[in-house]
Amino acid sequence: IADRQSSFLLRGNTDERVEKQLVESGLNLSSDVVESVRPLSEMTAQKKFMELVSPRIVLETGRSGKIPEGRAFVRLDPSTSPSVPVFATASDGAVTVDLTGASLIVQCYGSSKLFRLPIAGRTASSSSGL
């Protein structure tokens, strides 16, 4: 889902085969937010996939239980990328993502987390329309 300024990638429950096809497709997979039913792992195909997506946040959905200790952030490439925050509906409850202003704002209604990430080149009047 994308407009001129923002993008969401709904990964769902894709497996390694689909991720490999997407990596090899040459498509621009870069997205502000990636949603995933399955947690991120160390699989090589998935690592390449996530490096191409290069999300600002990860939203894990559809899984029961809490995020394991130490999984609040994930580092996509330890040598080059900053840590990416992970939010999970299983432990954070309902989650909203707002990209309509100068910041990406994540509100978690089960855990009461509020996360704000400024987006370079955006002003408060910008609207993503998402």
Image (spheres, rainbow, N blue to C red):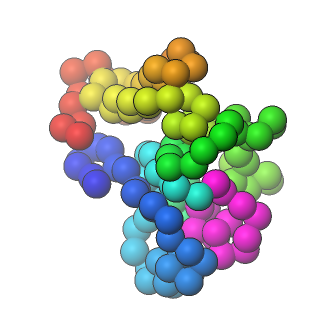
Q: Is residue 109 left or right of residue 51?
A: left
Residue 50 is situated, as x and y percent measured from the top left of the image, at 59, 61
Q: Residue at x 79, y 52 (%)?
A: 78
Q: Is residue 90 left or right of residue 31?
A: right
Residue 102 is situated, as x and y percent measured from the top left of the image, at 35, 24
Residue 100 is situated, as x and y percent measured from the top left of the image, at 27, 28
Q: Quadrant of residue 5?
A: top left
Q: Which residues are magenta?
A: 39-51
Q: Is residue 65 magenta?
A: no
Instruction: Using the image, determine if residue 109 lies above or below residue 58.
Output: above
Q: Nearer the viewer, residue 56 or 106?
A: 106
Q: Is residue 44 magenta?
A: yes
Which residue of the protein is positioned furthest toward the front in this rendering?
Answer: 64
Residue 35: in sight, yes or no? yes
* Quarter of the rendering occupied by the C terminus: top left
Q: Residue at x 50, y 29 (%)?
A: 93
Q: Nearer the viewer, residue 69 or 51?
A: 69
Residue 91 is situated, as x and y percent measured from the top left of the image, at 61, 32
* Quarter of the rendering occupied by the N terminus: bottom left
Q: Residue at x 32, y 44 (%)?
A: 6
